[in-house]
Amino acid sequence: MPTMSKPPHSPAGVPDAAAEGAWNDLLGSQIRDLRKRRGLTLSELADRIGRSLGYVSQVERGSSKLSISDLERIAAALDVQIGWFFQGPSAAPPEERDIVVRRANRRRLEFTGSGVGEELLSPTLTGDIELILTTLEPGASTGPTPRQRRGEEAGLVLSGILDLELEDRRLRLEAGDSFSLHKNGHHMVHNPGDEPTVVVWIISPPVY
C-alpha cells in the first residue's frame, strides 16, 4: 500500500504553509472532480459522510484540513478506495496542472488481493475521455463477474497476454494488439500468462 503524501516541512520540522495549502487545494480538487463525475451535489455528499454542507465546500476549496477518517468516509461515499487520493511526492507545477501527469505523480488504485492495479494517466476527471494504465499480475482478472460499460472503451496491450471476455466470445491479445468496445456491453479481462500484463485504456466518459 502506498503512503499518503504529506506537505513538505521546513528544516525545523514545521510544515511549510504554502506547501500545505497546495496539498489541500490538490486534494480538494480531486474530491470535487470525483463528486461531479459521480453526479452528486455538495449536499448529497455531506449527507453521506455525516458532515455539514459548509465543511464539504471548504474541503473542496482547499480551505479546511481533512482528517484521515473523513477522507475514508468520502472515499466510501464516492465508491473508491482511499488510495485514489494517494499521490506521488509532489504536485504538478502550475504551468503543467490539468495538462501533464508526470509518472511519479500518477494517482494509483490497488485492488487488494486481486492482482490488479490501476494508474490514472489523465490530469483530471472533468474531461470527456480518461486514460488508465492497468497492470494485471499473472492469473489476475477483473472478475469474478463481467463489468457493464457505461461508455465507449478501447485499449492497447503494452506487454504480456490479455484474454478479453465478451458476452459471446473470448479473444486473446498480445503486446501491440488493440481493441475497441461499444457502450452498454459487458466485459472482463484476465491475464493467463506468467508475466504481468500492462494495458492502456481509453474510456469515454470517465468512470472513476
Image (tube, helix red, strand yellow):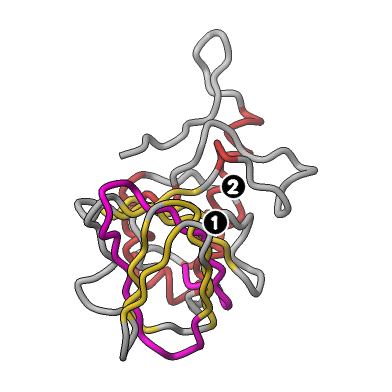
Q: Secondary structure at mark 1?
A: helix
The quadrant of the rendering that contains the N terminus is top left
Residue 157 screen position, x and y as percent: 48, 60
Quadrant for residue 168, please give it. bottom left
- Crowding around mark 1 (Cα neighbors within 10 Å: few <14, some 14 to 19, many 20+) is some
Name which residue lies at 58% across and 33% down.
90
* Marks 2 and 1, how far apart at CA: 6 Å
Residue 169 screen position, x and y as percent: 32, 85
Q: Amino acid at mark 2?
A: Leu
Name which residue lies at 26% across and 60% down.
192
Residue 26 is marked as 2
- Which residue is tagged 1? 30
Q: Amino acid at mark 1?
A: Gln
Residue 200 is marked as none
Q: Is residue 205 left or right of residue 78?
A: right
Q: Which residues are magenta?
A: 181-208
Residue 153 screen position, x and y as percent: 52, 76
Query: Badges 2 and 1: C-beta atoms under 8 Å apart?
Result: yes
199 or 175: which is nearer to us? 175
Q: Secondary structure at mark 2?
A: helix
Judged from this view, the residue extending furthest toward the right is 95
Give above or below for 22 relative to 11: below
Give above or below for 110 relative to 48: above
Quadrant for residue 127, please give it. bottom right
Name which residue lies at 73% across and 53% down.
99
Judged from this view, the residue extending furthest toward the top is 12
- Crowding around mark 2 (Cα neighbors within 10 Å: few <14, some 14 to 19, many 20+) is many
Q: How many marks?
A: 2
Give above or below for 1 relative to 52: above
